[in-house]
Amino acid sequence: MGRPARIDRAAILDAAFELADREGLDAVSMHAVARRLNVTPMALYRHLDGKEALLDGLVERLLTEFRAPRAGQDREQWLTAMAGGIRAVARRHPAVFPLLLTRPAVTPAARGVRDAVVAALQDAGLTEAAARRAERLVSSAVLGFAASEAAGRFRQHEQAVVDEDFAELLRWLRLALTGPHHQE
């Protein structure tokens, strides 16, 4: 019988996330994560295929930190809750958040969040193709705003102005989702 595992995928992602939060994404490597866990880098490869899988896991962590829409939930409610959740994640993890702008959702849990958004859009009356397009556009708009805010792009404005801008972005998105082209 072998030794019990000292680490698992969750522990690896926890260590990588903490490292990225504290020192930035450039500090994240298999070696750096292994050092944090007091294991050899090769021990990580039992749980992840390499740095790309590690980064994909961080995307998963970011996406699963907020509530995805639930079946039958009112579109206004889930859009507001999801967008606010994304914005809060960006504020908590400004150094890690840019991954959502550069990497697709590829792990099952990350794809589950994306698919829940698509399903909610379909529940709201969009065809599958229109829902997939809307998910890409809505998420790009919300992620872009959240990343810009977290990076300090809006720091010259009062917080009330930024909050009003975010509310206006959500109003635009709601209008776009109910427009005549939403059935395409």
Image (tube, rainbow, N blue to C red):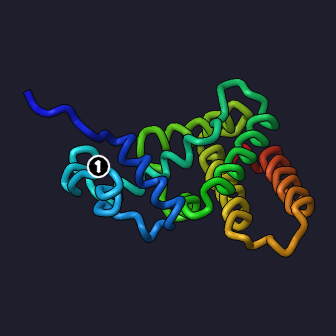
Q: According to the image, label 1 marks what residue?
A: 48
Figure quadrant of the N terminus: top left
The percent position of residue 55, horizontal first and vertical second, equals: 41, 57
The percent position of residue 15, horizontal first and vertical second, equals: 41, 51
Mark 1 residue type: Leu
In the image shown, does 94 or 72 lie closer to the viewer? 94
Residue projecting furthest to the left? 1
Name the residue: 90% across, 57% down: 164
Look at the picture and state if 6 lies above or below 141: above
- Would residue 53 appear left or right of 94 to someone viewing this image? left
- Would residue 101 appear left or right of 139 to someone viewing this image? left
Mark 1 burial class by Cα count in 10 Å: few <14, some 14-19, many 20+:
some
Is residue 137 at least partly visible in the picture? no
The percent position of residue 13, horizontal first and vertical second, equals: 41, 48
Could you say whether the residue bearing mark 1 is in a helix, strand or loop?
Answer: loop
Residue projecting furthest to the top? 72
Residue projecting furthest to the front? 38
Q: Quadrant of residue 27?
A: bottom left
In the image shown, does 36 or 117 lie closer to the viewer? 36
Name the residue: 65% across, 25% down: 71
- Would residue 109 appear left or right of 39 to someone viewing this image? right
The percent position of residue 131, horizontal first and vertical second, equals: 64, 43
